């Protein structure tokens, strides 16, 4: 019997702790497969800070760092400067990257740090139980915006990809989603491109992946995917925000 | 060996490089800015890395990343900046990452002043960040001593897998002294000696060798095991790594306790008092963590009284009293903020204690 498909060895055998319907599982697999396909095995380091993906060191089968909330790009900077030939990636959520870690992500991009960031945006703080994030949509009900996010009170949702694309040091920024097969393939290709650019010594790359959080959105997985398509994608348009390699 | 006249900040920076440090991440803040300035010029000369971070928070996290690869890494800052680093220091202590951190103390609280102070003693030795942890904390009192300690600081950090803190002050870094520099060490990461470090791993390799640099133990039993392990390391450090200096304490009737640059002022005061015929010595902890409790008690067993002198509100005085447990009369003298206690003031205080029959 021949093997026609097998799980990438770049994921461990540990079962994910993620909630049913959460997109982290798909995104983890895409990242791990992309890591395997780089052929950089033995020279890959990942960094995952506080958030739902804080246990990523249990799942990604490479050298891994757990980082303080928001600090992954700074930790990755230290790793990359010490091991310039390694493939270094961060895996961060929106509460992390778009709030407490804005200084670190902006300056990593600004320095043109040769790292790849996988930014999983589900418009909410998942790990702590569904609080409003800077990315929560206007009107979105969360445990800390029980009357819906009020733009006059706490501002409009922040579009990190568009913001970071303005920075000269950012080399490649794309926003993706994993809501259907076509988009899953696009996401994987984007991640692979980010890794390829890093190995070529280009600049900072970030792939934002829109994701569902059925548990904290109070929706079932199918409804959550529909909510993402009807509410998140219109506000957070998919596509390449910047690609210096395509110029 | 020829002596060179060097400024403290530059001498300490060069000493770290001579000890194998090849990565510096920092941020400007008075009175330690000469350290990043020196590193920015020197690191490229020797194939090292100087990187100015966007904040002290980022700098210590860059240290966390580079130290996790096994490299010898250093950062420096001054009091308000070191406060910002505490999050990262706690993570480094939890993840057991060897590194060297310099605190060139200035006056506080808050923005305080830019002059020298010793107000960060509590922060340094009683835990500046969250959780039960300690840093091996050296409080050198001369530039040469700082250079000499730096030569083994990384060895200690790596042996015990703890961050090492230098508790210096603005005077130490701004003054110049003749110093002797040690030879250059070319440090190479040895994956066999640092099996915990991210030195390269792929699926199929020995799973035990995959680096997981982490301070999270979500299961309380596992966190307890981890903490007990850390405490066992700290017990070893307490046993093996205490350093102190006894200056003319053998026949002393009075001993002054002081650390860092204040201990130099205390020694001048002791010498002056001895000229008056009053037998005064100085006990100086060189490691303020671990604190030499038993050694202080032993060195002062025949004295009439002890005077603790500090450039703070008497933070180390708590450890002095803990060492003596009420067995001797003790007094504190010092100033908060950045006003240094003077020899004249210390002499007057000893006279006052004698008048009170202490």
Image (cartoon, coloured by chain):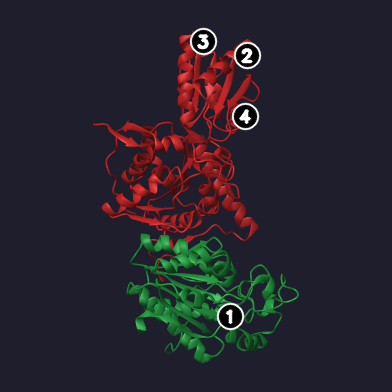
Q: Nearer the viewer, mark 1 or mark 3?
A: 3
CA gap between label 1 and label 3 equals: 76 Å
Q: Residue at x 49, y 36 (%)?
A: B116
Q: Which residue is mark 4?
A: B322
Q: Position of residue A160 (x, y in %)?
A: 53, 75
Q: Which residue is mark 2?
A: B358
Give a yes or no on whether discs 4 and 2 share a subunit: yes
The reply to whether callout 2 and callout 3 are in contact (CB within 8 Å) is no
Q: Position of residue B178 (x, y in %)?
A: 31, 31
Give a yes or no on whether discs 2 and 3 share a subunit: yes
Q: Tell me the number on the disc at residue B278.
A: 3
CA gap between label 4 and label 2 equals: 19 Å
Q: Which residue is mark 1?
A: A211
CA gap between label 2 and label 3 equals: 13 Å
The answer to whether one can see residue A16 in this image is yes
CA gap between label 3 and label 4 equals: 26 Å
Q: Secondary structure at mark 3?
A: loop
User: Which chain is rendered red in the image?
Assistant: B
């Amino acid at each position: 019997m021949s093997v026609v498909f097998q799980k990438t060895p770049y994921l461990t055998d540990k079962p994910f702790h993620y909630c049913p319907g959460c997109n982290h599982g798909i995104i983890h697999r895409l990242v791990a497969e992309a890591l395997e396909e780089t052929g950089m095995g033995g020279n890959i380091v990942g960094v995952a800070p506080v958030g739902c993906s804080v246990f990523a060191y249990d799942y990604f089968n490479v050298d891994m760092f757990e980082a303080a909330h928001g600090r992954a790009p700074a930790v990755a900077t230290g790793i990359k400067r010490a091991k310039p030939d390694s493939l270094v990636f961060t895996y961060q959520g929106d509460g992390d990257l778009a709030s407490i870690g804005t200084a670190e992500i902006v300056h990593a991009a600004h320095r043109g740090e040769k790292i790849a960031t996988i930014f999983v945006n589900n418009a909410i703080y998942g790990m702590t139980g569904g609080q409003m994030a800077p990315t929560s949509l206007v009107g979105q009900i969360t445990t800390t915006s029980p009357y819906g996010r009020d733009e006059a009170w706490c501002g409009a949702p922040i579009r990190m990809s568009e913001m970071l694309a303005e920075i000269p040091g950012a080399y490649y920024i794309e926003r993706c989603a994993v809501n259907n097969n076509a988009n899953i393939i696009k996401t994987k290709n984007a991640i692979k491109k980010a890794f390829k650019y890093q190995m070529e010594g280009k600049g900072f790359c970030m792939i934002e992946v829109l994701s569902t959080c059925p548990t904290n959105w109070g929706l079932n997985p199918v409804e959550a995917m529909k909510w993402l398509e009807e509410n998140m994608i219109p506000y957070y348009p998919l596509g390449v925000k910047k690609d210096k390699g395509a110029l | 060996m020829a002596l060179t006249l060097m400024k403290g900040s530059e001498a300490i920076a060069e000493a770290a490089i001579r000890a194998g440090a090849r990565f510096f991440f920092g941020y400007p803040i008075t009175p330690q800015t000469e350290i990043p300035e020196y590193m920015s010029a020197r690191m490229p000369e020797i194939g090292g890395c100087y990187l100015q971070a966007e904040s002290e928070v980022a700098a210590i996290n860059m240290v966390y990343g580079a130290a996790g690869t096994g490299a010898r890494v250093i950062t420096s800052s001054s009091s308000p900046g070191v406060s910002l680093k505490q999050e990262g220091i706690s993570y480094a202590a939890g993840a057991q990452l060897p590194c060297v951190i310099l605190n060139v103390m200035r006056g506080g609280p808050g923005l305080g002043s830019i002059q020298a102070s010793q107000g960060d003693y509590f922060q340094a030795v009683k835990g500046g960040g969250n959780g039960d942890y300690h840093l091996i904390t050296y409080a050198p009192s001369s530039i040469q001593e700082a250079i000499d300690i730096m030569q083994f600081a990384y060895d200690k950090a790596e042996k015990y897998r703890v961050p090492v803190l230098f508790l210096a002050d603005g005077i130490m870094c701004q003054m110049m002294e003749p110093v002797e520099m040690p030879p250059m060490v070319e440090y190479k990461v040895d994956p066999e000696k640092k099996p915990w470090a991210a030195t390269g791993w792929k699926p199929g390799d020995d799973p035990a060798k995959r680096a997981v640099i982490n301070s999270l133990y979500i299961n309380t039993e596992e966190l307890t095991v981890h903490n007990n392990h850390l405490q066992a390391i700290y017990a070893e450090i307490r046993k093996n790594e205490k350093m102190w200096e006894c200056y003319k304490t053998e026949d002393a009737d009075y001993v002054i306790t002081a650390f860092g640059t204040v201990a130099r002022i205390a020694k001048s005061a002791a010498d002056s008092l001895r000229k008056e015929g009053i037998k005064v010595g100085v006990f100086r902890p060189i490691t303020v963590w671990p604190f030499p409790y038993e050694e202080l008690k032993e060195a002062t067993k025949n004295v009439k009284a002890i005077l603790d002198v500090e450039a703070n509100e008497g933070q180390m005085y708590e450890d002095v009293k803990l060492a003596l447990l009420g067995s001797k009369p003790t007094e504190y003298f010092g100033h908060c903020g950045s006003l240094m206690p003077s020899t004249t003031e210390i002499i007057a205080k000893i006279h006052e204690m004698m008048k009170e029959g202490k």
